[in-house]
Image (cartoon, rainbow, N blue to C red):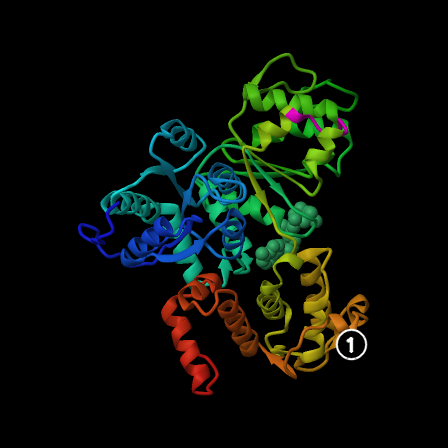
Amino acid sequence: MQTEIRTEPYTPRTSTLSLLVVDDESTTRDLCKDVATDAGFHVIIATTTEEALENLDSRAIDIVITDLQVPQIGGLELLKKIRADFPECAVIMLTQYGTIKTAIEATKLGAADYITKPFHVEELLTKLARISHSIETDQENRLLREQLKSRPGFGSFIGVSPKMQRVYKLIQKVAQHNYPVLIMGESGTGKELVARSIHFAGPRKNKPFAPVDCSSLVPTLIESELFGYVKGAFTGAQHSKQGLFESAGDGTLFLDEIGELPVDLQSKLLRALQEREIKPVGSNERVGIRARVIAATNRDLESAIRTSEFRQDLYFRLNVVQIKLPPLRERKVDIPLLVSAFLEKFSDPARPIHTISDDAMRRIMAYDWPGNIRELENAVERAVALGSGPILHVGDLPSNLQYTSAEKLPDVDELVPLEALERRAIFRALRETSGDKLAAARLLGIGKTTLYRKLKQYEAGRPAA
Ligand SMILES: Nc1ncnc2c1ncn2[C@@H]1O[C@H](COP(=O)(O)OP(=O)(O)OP(=O)(O)O)[C@@H](O)[C@H]1O
Ligand SMILES: [Mg+2]
């Protein structure tokens, strides 16, 4: 193995990609680390797959180099997990000489490349250069980075937690394609917002977005809503009517609460998706469909499949890409940003509410938010409507928040002006990234220079501009 580190012909990069090296064997691990650090990557190391997954969960990682034989679950299983949960992350497998079959298997499973040990530094550099080039020139990613730089979220989304950043990346990626998307998440986590964002971020944005709530209609109505009907198809059908599949044209059909669709309609929907054709109620003629289908549910479809309430074949058809929305309690770091955005949204511009009392903020942070963002949004709207002065107090919050047990409350300052919410988000991000300013800036969705400027201002004891 060659240990000399040569950075030529690798050109230094302008932005830093993060790279995770997973190997329990220190020689290879350290070599990869040195080579990649010299080439300008931000390198993190892990010695087990568990450690690797923890890192992937807590920060944005662009490339993973993993050994095939790594404790606990091994490189191939880790690769599968990364493909499923972090599809935007590229994986390079390190394999032993003579295990070419496994290397090919890894490529089939979605590894971006493989390197056989022992390897030359140049080989690693060339492969890293190729992969980072494709990451960087990826138009969708570039667009996303621009958006993340300019606001604490993405489009209409607020939130900078790693879990939400993964969601934004996926939205950006799937928006450019036509395959079905299944959005899963508890009530109020933003499923419809995701569906709309996919539609409006892609080439169908000027075509119709047709939502249909499968839980709010009786079965016969859903069928005619979706597929349309011809005159005389049933009592009262005095005219033919186009269904949503047809009227969505080249746009998007959003099947909300798909888990509530009756089983017989599930078969009809499956046929429509497979054949790209529908038959309006009462008609024998088939009509072609072109709309993209996005489905959402707050139900655990896999358990509905086990109890025969949901067809497995339809699940496979819809679940080409799955976007899982985290509940708010799993991304509490986003709460201050959401509160400040909702305060701005709901407060009267003539009498804006900029601050929230210590106690009120503590209760908001301590609460579990079973109704997720919708519940938080409603709570802030209500508090703003009830509040009398420029400060929002506990008494303005819904009663279930007023009685949160005191032990659960985290420590915060006396009063929390909006500027302090921002400062808190910054320090929280720095804590989560162990002081890595670049990673913290990415987490916060702001540029590195903005973060440096704000930190300087804090150090000087001035409020950040
Ligand atoms: N990340 C976010 N940032 C800001 N607002 C959000 C975010 N996610 C959701 N919201 C807002 O929260 C409310 C609920 O979102 P949405 O209707 O998309 O959720 P849902 O998952 O479809 O809920 P349900 O299961 O109840 O239908 C909306 O007003 C939406 O604009
Ligand atoms: Mg919804």
Expressed as whole percent of the image width and height from the top left, the position of residue 259 reads: 71, 35
Identify the residue at the far top of this view: 284
Is 308 colored magenta in this rendering? Answer: yes
User: Height in image: 461 above or below 2?
Assistant: below
Magenta stretch: give its range.
307-312
Displayed quadrant of residue 357: bottom right
Residue 66, magenta (yes or no): no
Residue 209 at x, y = what percent? 56, 40
Residue 163 relative to residue 126: left or right:
right
From the viewer's perspective, tell me whether residue 61 is left or right of residue 275: left
Which of the pair 440/33 is nearer the observer? Answer: 33
Which residue is painted at 55% across and 56% down in the image? 157
Secondary structure that dominates the magenta span: loop
Residue 211 seen in the figure: yes
Q: Is residue 13 left or right of residue 464?
A: left
Above or below residue 449? Residue 147 is: above
The residue under label 1 is 395
As shown in the figure, which amino acid type bears the numbered disc 1? Answer: Gly
